[in-house]
Image (spheres, rainbow, N blue to C red):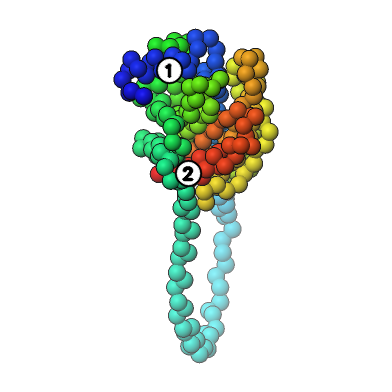
Amino acid sequence: MQNSRVERTRWLSRLVPRKSSYWVVLMAVVLAFAITSCNIFRRAQPTATPEPPPPTDTPVPPTDTPVPPTDTPTPVPPTDTPTPEPPTATPEPPTATPAPEPQVTIPRGWGPVVNERLGFSYAVPPGWLSFDLQSGQLSQIMRFVSPAAAQQVDDALSGEGGEYAGHLSAQVAIFSRPPIAALAGVGIFPNLDDDISSERLVDWLSDMLERLPLPVPVEVQSLEAGTTNNLPSINGVATADLAAQGLFSAHIEITALRANDTAYILVVAVPENQVRNRRQEINQIIGTFRPE
């Protein structure tokens, strides 16, 4: 396959019909999950409770009653000089608990996807295509074959939180129908408050995912706090009903890693009827995901 723009445009024109397609709908799902999840984490941050002002001392009014003179005090006999206590050792300050290091495994032959701007990486199987969503490359290519789909991408990236969308990877199958066999996308949410528990974020995320403004119905199957690649995480499963587009349902897995003050959000989507056969591949993609 040649990499020239003409050849690439002709090739993608076979993948992206001019009507609503699996590519357009599922890509909108991935982008909405990544970008909207960033806004969910922002809304989930608790506001600080202001501390009450310190109490002020009430002045005691002066009294005019004179103090009578006191008698000459009787001298106190001297007491023995107390024996000084031996000095105690200065306690050492407690050592800070080191942050956990991510642990990933990249299968042989897989292609790494590194986003230096947002600080994350993951890997995809051979044959997958990956695009930096901020580069405009994907939108420019899609504009030749589906201007409406390109506009959806542009609107998502120019909206609130769009700058935190990272990469999108796709597995293509030219002779299959639909031609897009799987998708993976990553976005981040920076400046996360350390005081927010993963359990509280799960509650917010579960409520908001049910009401995402998507072109297809999305149902959250599960969402819970856990550990992924040695980092605290939130792991969820959802389905997107594509019957209105004449297609099948999509199985979507969400993995949000928490490292320092940032949440890194990976979304992997495959046809629901292929989940069992692709379970190992899904787990391997998630197993390569880490902050840099």
Q: Relative to residue 31, is residue 114 drawn left or right?
A: left
Query: Which of these two is toward me, 24 or 8?
Result: 8
Who is closer to the viewer here, 275 or 266? 275
For the residues bearing labels 2 and 1, Cβ distance under 8 angstroms: no
- On the image, the x and y values in percent for residue 51 come to 56, 43
Q: Residue at label 1?
A: 12
Q: Which residue appears farthest toward the left when viewing the image?
A: 4
- Spot occupied by residue 179 in the image (x, y as percentages of width and height): 52, 21
Between label 2 and label 1, give the one nearer the viewer. Answer: 1
The C terminus, quarter of image: top left
Query: Crowdedness of circle 2 by 10 Å Cα count: few (<14), some, many (20+)?
Result: many
Question: Measuring 45% from the left and 11% from the top, which residue is drawn there?
Answer: 146
- Measuring 64% from the left and 22% from the top, which residue is drawn there? 248
Query: Which quarter shows the N terminus?
Result: top left
Q: Nearer the viewer, residue 57 or 103?
A: 103
Residue under the image location 58 percent in, 37 percent down: 278
State the residue in front, 48 or 210: 210
Residue 154 visible in the snapshot: no
- Residue position for label 2: 288
Q: Is residue 127 visible?
A: yes
Residue 69 as seen in the image, left or right of residue 290:
right
Secondary structure, mark 1, is helix
Which amino acid type is shown beneath numbered disc 1?
Answer: Leu
Please provide percent x and percent y for residue 189: 48, 35
Mark 1 nearby-residue class (10 Å; few <14, some 14–19, many ≥20)? some
